[in-house]
């Protein structure tokens, strides 16, 4: 899928049309882990004037079976970097497929509420939930939404972000 078809571009187009008070900068990289995000964040913060940081990271860590405590520590360090620049943080829940077993899945899921509580940051719902249960809106891997799902995700994220701000 091309970047122009993704929910971030679609949402930014809508925000521009509405003359909204915010824009989205998509700093994501396919396959990114919390460790990768943590390593890249200082450069992102140096290049952009950011008021809010929406963190939607950890899924690839979970898919690789990384220890939940490592994921949690990386997310907390990301938030510390943002807070040092007076950036408000929003954290999105992330889910992984159930085949990792109930114990790991629960520990993984708890990471996001733990981080939100420890950092006093709003915890946002898992935004692809709105399309994840419809196989026609998910790619063959069952993890990534299709091009057809992107307008739905843009609408969902706008509602979630507007409520959080």
Image (cartoon, helix red, strand yellow):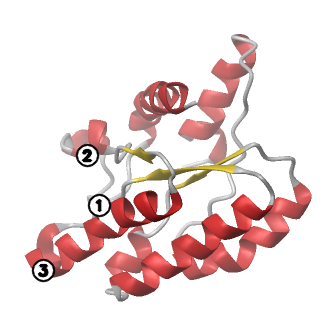
Taking 9 as reference, is 50 left or right?
right
Mark 1, Cα crowd under 10 Å, few <14 / some 14-19 / many 20+, is: many
Residue at image point 82% right, 61% down: 45
Measured Cα–Cα span from mark 3 to mark 2: 22 Å
In this figure, which residue is indicated by the disc labeled 3? 103
Measured Cα–Cα span from mark 1 to mark 2: 11 Å
Q: Is residue 84 visible?
A: yes
- Residue 13 spot, x, y in % from top left: 69, 24
Question: Residue 74 occupies which quadrant of the picture?
Answer: bottom right
Residue at image point 12% right, 80% down: 103
Task: Tell me, for residue 132, which label it has, or none.
Answer: 2
In this figure, which residue is indicated by the disc labeled 1? 95
Which of 150/98 is in front?
98
Q: Secondary structure at mark 2?
A: helix
- Residue 53 spot, x, y in % from top left: 65, 50
Q: Secondary structure at mark 3?
A: helix
């Amino acid at each position: 899928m091309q970047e122009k078809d993704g929910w971030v571009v679609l949402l930014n187009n809508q925000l521009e049309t509405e003359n909204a008070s915010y824009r989205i900068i998509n700093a994501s990289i396919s396959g990114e882990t919390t460790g990768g995000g943590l390593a890249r964040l200082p450069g992102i913060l140096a290049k952009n004037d950011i008021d809010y940081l929406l963190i939607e990271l950890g899924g690839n860590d979970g898919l690789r079976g990384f220890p939940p405590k490592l994921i949690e520590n990386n997310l907390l360090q990301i938030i510390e970097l943002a807070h040092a620049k007076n950036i408000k943080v929003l954290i999105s829940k992330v889910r992984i497929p159930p085949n990792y077993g109930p114990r790991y899945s629960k520990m993984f899921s708890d990471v996001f509420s733990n981080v939100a509580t420890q950092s006093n940051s709003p915890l946002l719902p898992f935004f692809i939930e709105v399309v994840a249960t419809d196989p026609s809106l998910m790619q063959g891997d069952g993890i990534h939404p299709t091009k057809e799902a992107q307008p739905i995700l843009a609408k969902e994220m706008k509602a979630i972000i507007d409520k959080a701000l």
